[in-house]
Structures are given as C-alpha cells and as structure tokens.
Image: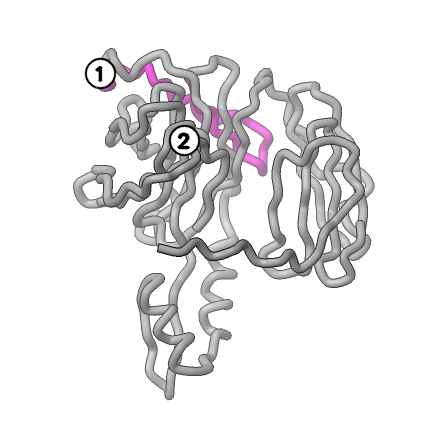
Amino acid sequence: MSKRPPPDPVAVLRGHLAPVMDLCFHPSKPMLFAGSSNGELRIWDTVQHRTVSSSCQVKDGTVKCWDIEAGGLSRTPSLTIQTKSYHFCKLLLVKKPSICLRKIGGIEVHGGMEDQESIHREGPYDDSENAQQNDMLTEGPKYMVMAGEQLSEVEIWDLNTAEKLAQLSSNSSGVSSKHSARMCLAVQAFLLLESQRFLNVLAGYEDGCMMWWDMRNSGIPLSSGKYHSEPVLSLHVDGHCNGGISGAADDKIATFTLDHPTGSCVLKKEIALKRPGIAGTAI
C-alpha cells in the first residue's frame, strides 16, 4: 500500500522562544492558543497568522483562568488557583457532550460521527437549533481535572469557587494491586446528558492501565483495564462521551467504548504504529 505524502501546511507561525508543548483552538473564534516550555502562553490569529497577545507564567504550581477579550487575554487573570502539583500531566476542563442534531428538509436527524459524515455528503443543513442546545450545556458548574500533588492521584477543582472537590486515587480499595500506586500521566473528564450534575473521569497511568470513575461513587472506579504495554500519554473522549482514543509510549493507538449502563470500558480496536510513541490524540 502506497504511503500518501503529508499535506503542505496552511501557515507556519513563528514567535515562540522555546519548544511548544501544547496547542488548543478556540471553539468558535479564529484563535489558536499555544503554550511553550518557558511558561509563555501565546494567542495567534489564525486568519491573519499573527500574534494577538501573550503572557508568561512561572513554574509556581498555580492555575490561572483568563477572560478572552477582543484584544486577546484580559490584563489580569479572573481566577488563580494555588495547587501543590508540579507535574507534566496536562490539566483539562470538563468535556460536555455535543448534541448531534441536524435538520435536512425539515427532518431532525440525531446521530454520531457516521451520521454527521453522511449529512455533510448529502448537502447543507440548519445548525441553529444545535448551537442553541450546545450553548445550554455550557451553563452550570465548571470543573477542572488534573494530576494531583500525590503522583497516583487525580484532583478535581471547582472553577467557580477555586476549591478542590475530590481526589481519586489509583490505590482505591476496589482496584487490584497490580494497578495500584501508579503515576497519572493523562486525564479526561466529562459530563453526560442524562446526568449533567455527575462527573466522570478517565485517567491513564505509567503502567499502561486506564481507570474510569463516576463521581457518585468516587471511592472505587467503575472500570479499569490495561490496553497498553507502556505509559498512557494521552486520552480523548468523543463528542457523545460514549467512547474515545488513547495513545501511549508503545507501538499502537487504542480505541474504546464506554458502556454507561454497565459501567465498563471496552477495548474496540487497536491501530498498529510503525513508530512508537503518541503524546497527543484528538477526535
């Protein structure tokens, strides 16, 4: 099978003075956020391909929340959380499920990724109602999940009150000993449509295992399994929060489903890699 050549870049953005460690697109504005190893957060205009604003943060264990204004970030952070965590595991905001609602000829279509692809092939659609319903999901509590002060723990913080709500330990009594006392390297948290108030957390560890928690019973994970032979470096849950993908230091990518009625995380497919090591995954 012939190997397709990589596409040419749309643009090359230059300006960072240190290696770029993380990237994130704004969901609705033409902005790209880039963080580098020297503590700089730089915002790029993806249309004009220029820097909008930048700020620097020292390695002091704090998490800062900023308001996005017309000229970039606000002059001062809207919230500063002092943690005791000094970790290279990326922190994440809680993922809320997107509603796949499309209207074609007056008919509502609900579905997943395959249905969306079919709709795009068939023609234009009205996305206004979908946008309104997704806006409703942004209301309510705002949480952040991160690797904790103790390397085997995951911490959950409330961004409205700057308080730590819970700690999830891989040493939980319901976890077998071979999966205990492992350093957390990847996290993902999400809310479900049918239980908006209840948080779910996925965590990947250095021994290749993953654990899934429902915060209604945070003492014991719903499910745990080992899908990688090397440390799990990245996790990403799909838009419906019914499954996801994981990357690790080994030679494969794993896709999995989250069976909510049974509380089980099931391996769906393994994709072999010629070059091992996946630091970031996205759906």
- Is 108 on the left or on the right of 82, as rendered? left
Image quarter (top left, top right, bottom left or bottom right) of the N terminus:
bottom left
What colouring method underlies this structural image? one colour
Up-down relation of residue 66 to residue 122 (above or below):
above
Give the residue type at disc 1: Ser
Give the residue type at disc 2: Ala
- Is 254 on the left or on the right of 261, as rendered? right
* Cα–Cα gap, marks 1 and 2: 21 Å
- Closer-to-camera residue (114/138): 114
On the image, the x and y values in percent for residue 145 come to 49, 32
Name the residue: 38% across, 65% down: 100
Q: What numbered label is drawn on residue 248?
A: 2
- Is 54 on the left or on the right of 194, as rendered? right
Up-down relation of residue 12 to residue 77 (above or below):
below
Magenta-drawn stretch contains 162: yes
Name the residue: 38% across, 68% down: 116
Magenta residues (range): 153-176
**Mark 2 neighbour class, 10 Å CA radius: few under 14, some 14 to 19, many 20 or more:** many
Name the residue: 38% across, 39% down: 273
On the image, the x and y values in percent for residue 9 come to 64, 56
On the image, the x and y values in percent for residue 131 come to 50, 67
Up-down relation of residue 58 to residue 29 (above or below):
above
**Mark 1 neighbour class, 10 Å CA radius: few under 14, some 14 to 19, many 20 or more:** few
Q: What numbered label is drawn on residue 176?
A: 1
- Closer-to-camera residue (11/232): 11
Up-down relation of residue 270 to residue 124 (above or below):
above
- Closer-to-camera residue (11/168): 11
The furthest residue to the bottom: 105
Dot 2: element: strand
